[in-house]
Image (tube, rainbow, N blue to C red):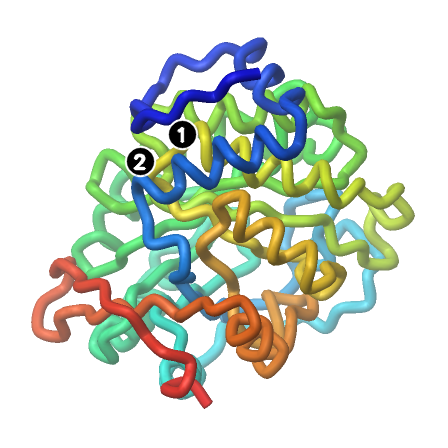
Amino acid sequence: MSLPHSIAPIRHDWTLEEIEAIFDLPFSDLLFRAQSIHRDHFDPNQIQVSTLLSIKTGACPEDCGYCAQSAKHEAKLESERLMPVGEVLKVAEEARSKGATRFCMGAAWRNPTDKNLDQVIAMVEGVHALGMETCVTLGMLNADQASRLKAAGLDYYNHNLDTSPEFYGQVITTRTYQDRLDTLEHVRNVGLKTCSGGILGMGESRRDRASMLRQLTNLPAHPESVPINLLVQVEGTPLFGQAQLDPFEFVRVVAAARILMPASYVRLSAGRTEMSDELQALCFLAGANSIFYGERLLTTPNAESDRDRQLFERLGLAFEQVEAERTEPGACHKHTEHKLALSV
């Protein structure tokens, strides 16, 4: 079929049938369309790099079927209290020295208490002072908590939709889909950037994957960052033993996300340890332009930093650099190219 090139409009009115038609394109046509749109909005040879740290691990009251941190599952995970601020900032400094430009902090809570939030705000202020972008994922937020985080200089709030509304109840029962949408609304309303995506390979259908993307792209504003996770199977969780997702299907989701949300960063997140270099290269070709960098993602392994540097060098990719103003929270950020030599 003919795919004439033009700058894709930003839409918030996609139908499920339109998105399913994108998924059904011949693979080469799908990648060509996604790569063309990607080049309209981004340098195709730069990748944004984030580091993720679990600042409070385990004992979560939620029952998310994929997560080792749930107190309701039998995964062998030792719970840990909230980390001291000084320890978090040491990790952030090390991540910055290795080339990370955004530092993400995750806590296994259903929702933070005011006391918890006070400590997280101190972490956000400290990381911001290092000149890095900041992101946290703390569970559900109310409007006042979102406002406090914005005032502290937070850049991004992560709250994934995980899957489609139709499949959601087969994965999680302790929090509703609307709860997730409400938190994203609170975050948007105070001017924070949103980071929201999903997890693939949980037993969902292609229609579920299309429906999840429809939820994201039809939000009032597209998430500025869209993490696409491949299920990391952890023994002791309900989803352990799921059939492996076809790698080409994973690439199709990345390409569809790029087409539907042209100006968003699309991030390869959990599951990269299971991906070959060739699969990751296809994902970058399909429009992925962000990764988590470092040996661990919350409680699961991540690709080693040396492997990432070697892959980027082979593909001719550079790390994107973000220089944050250090004097006042919420300041603008400057994007420049960051060569790999600076991160070794």
Q: Are marks 2 and 1 in contact (CB under 8 Å)?
A: yes
Q: Toward which corner of the image does residue 94 lie, by quadrant?
A: bottom left
Number of residues whose C-alpha sits closer than 10 Å to that of mark 1, classed few (under 14), some (14–19) or many (20 or more): some
Q: Residue at x 37, y 35 (%)?
A: 262
Q: Toward which corner of the image does residue 341 lie, by quadrant?
A: bottom left
Placement of 262 over or under 266, stated as above or below: above
- Looking at the picture, how far across and down is residue 256, in whole percent? 54, 31
- Looking at the picture, how far across and down is residue 200, in whole percent? 69, 40
Quick check: can you spot residue 86? no
Placement of 96 over or under 117, stated as above or below: below
Q: Residue at x 26, y 67 (%)?
A: 322
Between residues 262 and 160, which one lies in front from this camera angle?
A: 262
Residue under label 2, please give it.
Answer: 186
Could you tell me which secondary element the residue under label 1 belongs to?
Answer: helix
Q: Residue at x 50, y 61 (%)?
A: 291
Q: CA distance from mark 2 to mark 1?
A: 6 Å
- Amino acid of disc 1: Asp
Q: Which mark is residue 182?
A: 1
